[in-house]
């Protein structure tokens, strides 16, 4: 009877440990890379959403400025370098539909000394843009439904600064909004870590407005 003297083949314990260590390092690197990519994607998405809010706000403000009868700027705090509140008086364009009290329809204007007048001038809609708690709001008070109604809507989040200025004898209004984009998973709002971003626009007023400024 012949004896099989061939040695059994396989991995030694040291080889298995080395292979396990290499696999662990690869898996750890892959996991860290995936987490980093996820955080970067979340930050980019947050940044884009915030900037889209700023653009929607500036479009809304530009529309109100172009049709405003009066524009007034003021400061919520005397120590502020620039005004951060805008008050506008708008024409009373809408009225309640005769056939449907819950529906608003365009109002036909009357003409006085060549100027179009909508509704009762003493009841023109009043609009205010202001910042409270890093949220920028638009508040409108009007008598469109027959009684005084006030609607307030949040337009932007994480607002650091909101300022307006007048150029060309009050015919051009420059508006800027500064906000701080941050990671969703972090409450860190250190401006030295993540630089602020400013969105701005210039609005050319169609007609002469009664522009005023209060301290």
Image (cartoon, rainbow, N blue to C red):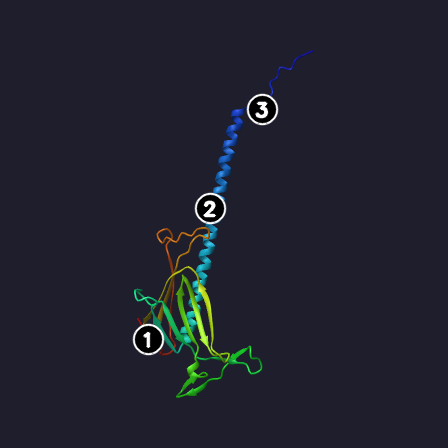
As measured in the structure, the alpha-carbon distance from the residue carrying label 3 to the one carrying label 2 is 39 Å
Left or right of residue 117: residue 103: right
Residue ranking furthest to the bottom: 113
Which is nearer the N-term, disc 1 or disc 2? 2
Q: Are marks 1 and 2 in contact (CB under 8 Å)?
A: no
Which is nearer the N-term, disc 3 or disc 2? 3
Q: Position of residue 116 (x, y in %)?
A: 43, 84
Residue 170: which numbered mark, if any? none
Q: Residues within 10 Å of mark 2 (few under 14, many from 20)?
A: few
Q: Nearer the viewer, residue 171 or 46?
A: 46
Q: Secondary structure at mark 1?
A: strand
Q: Position of residue 96 (x, y in %)?
A: 53, 80
Q: How many marks?
A: 3
As measured in the structure, the alpha-carbon distance from the residue carrying label 1 to the one carrying label 2 is 50 Å
| Residue corresponding to mark 2 | 36
Q: Position of residue 113 (x, y in %)?
A: 39, 88
Residue ranking furthest to the right: 1
Task: Name the image quarter holding residue 176.
Answer: bottom left
As measured in the structure, the alpha-carbon distance from the residue carrying label 3 to the one carrying label 1 is 89 Å
Left or right of residue 142: residue 71: left
Q: Nearer the viewer, residue 167 or 156?
A: 156
Q: Secondary structure at mark 2?
A: helix
Which is nearer the N-term, disc 3 or disc 1? 3
Q: Position of residue 85 (x, y in %)?
A: 37, 69
Task: Name the image quarter holding residue 78.
Answer: bottom left
Q: Secondary structure at mark 3?
A: loop
Q: Nearer the viewer, mark 3 or mark 2?
A: 2
As drawn, 200 above or below 67:
above
Q: Residues within 10 Å of mark 1 (few under 14, many from 20)?
A: few
| Residue corresponding to mark 1 | 212
């Amino acid at each position: 009877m012949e004896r099989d003297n061939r040695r059994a083949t396989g991995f030694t314990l040291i080889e298995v440990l080395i292979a396990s260590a290499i696999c662990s390092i690869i898996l750890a690197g892959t996991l860290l890379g995936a987490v980093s990519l996820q955080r970067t994607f979340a930050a980019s998405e947050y940044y884009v959403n915030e900037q889209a809010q700023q653009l929607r706000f500036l479009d809304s403000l530009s529309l109100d400025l172009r049709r405003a009868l009066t524009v007034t700027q003021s400061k919520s705090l005397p120590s502020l370098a620039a005004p951060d509140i805008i008050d506008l008086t708008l024409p009373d364009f809408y009225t309640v539909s005769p056939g449907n009290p819950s529906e608003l329809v365009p109002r036909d204007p009357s003409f006085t000394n060549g100027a179009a007048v909508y509704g009762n001038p003493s009841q023109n809609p009043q609009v205010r843009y202001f910042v409270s708690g890093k949220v920028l709001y638009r508040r409108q008070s009007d008598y469109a439904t027959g009684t005084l109604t006030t609607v307030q809507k949040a337009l932007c989040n994480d607002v650091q600064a909101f300022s307006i200025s007048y150029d060309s004898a009050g015919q051009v209004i420059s508006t800027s909004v500064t906000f701080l984009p941050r990671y969703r998973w972090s409450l860190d709002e250190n401006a030295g870590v993540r630089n602020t971003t400013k969105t701005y626009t210039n609005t050319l007023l169609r007609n002469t407005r009664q522009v005023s400024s209060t301290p």
